[in-house]
Amino acid sequence: MTPSAAPVEKMPAREAYALLAPEYDRSPNALISLEERTMAPLLPDLRGGRAVDVGAGRGRWASRLAARGAFAIAVDFCHEMLQWTSTPAVQADGGLLPLRDSCADFVVCAFALGYAPDIFGELRRIVRPGGMVLASDVHPEALRRGWTRTFRHNGGAIEVAHDAYSLEDLRAPDLRLTGLSEPRLGEPERAIFEQAGYAERFAETSQFPAIFVAQWVRR
């Protein structure tokens, strides 16, 4: 995922991630780097709990939740992505999860809210009262400034289509917002920009929030 790489082709998310699956998460990525160092400290003690990683991709967060003692399930609409997961996995649309109400103690959704507007409602539905929802995504303001969800692939690039939304859309009476971070790219990400050949872009892109990480508790 890169702020400003010129796309070769714009694709629907399901089609794009089917192609990206074998290499996704394997190369240094500035936004994922920023997200992980922002979000990882927020993970609670999950020993004996039930956790769901919605829009899990290759199960990056599901595997971390399992390592912290949770029974973790990865859910994604892309079968090719789920083939790489190390936890139990379910192929399903994030906007229509085949999970019962209030079934999870903890729900995480990383870089997926922009692909299906209904995901937020499903995160709320499946987390139990008192449980936590933790979500990250490319900052809506960054997208409005011209950033794209673009990935290198086979010498070119793929831009993944997404739906626009705002942080104001992520509000609900049954969720209490307990934390919102809007971090900018920092020194750990500068090295990734330099390695990718985009050193000259770092100063500009680091002036504004690159992602957000939000945390809610179900009432």
Image: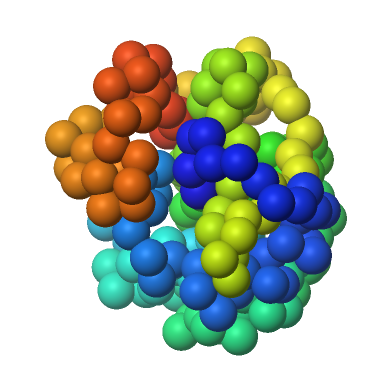
- The reply, left or right, for residue 49 in relation to residue 74 is left
Q: Which residue is drawn at 25% across and 45% down?
A: 194
Q: Which residue is drawn at 29% across and 74% down?
A: 67
Task: Residue 106 in the image: state x and y as whole percent.
Answer: 47, 53
Task: Residue 133 in the image: state x and y as whole percent.
Answer: 51, 42
Task: Residue 34 in the image: state x and y as whole percent.
Answer: 31, 41
- The reply, left or right, for residue 96 in relation to residue 63 is right
- Relative depth, front residue between 16 and 179: 16
Q: In this view, does 17 lie above or below 102?
A: below
- Relative depth, front residue between 5 and 15: 5
- The reply, left or right, for residue 107 in relation to residue 34 is right
Q: Which residue is drawn at 57% across and 29% down?
A: 147
Q: Quadrant of residue 215?
A: top left
- Relative depth, front residue between 37 and 208: 208
Colour convention of the picture? rainbow
Quadrant where the C terminus is found in the figure? top right
Question: Quick check: can you spot residue 162?
Answer: yes
- The reply, left or right, for residue 100 in relation to residue 212 is right
Question: Quick check: can you spot residue 40?
Answer: no
Number of numbered discs: 0
- Relative depth, front residue between 137 and 170: 137
Q: In this view, does 202 lie above or below 167?
A: below
Task: Residue 198 in the image: state x and y as whole percent.
Answer: 35, 40
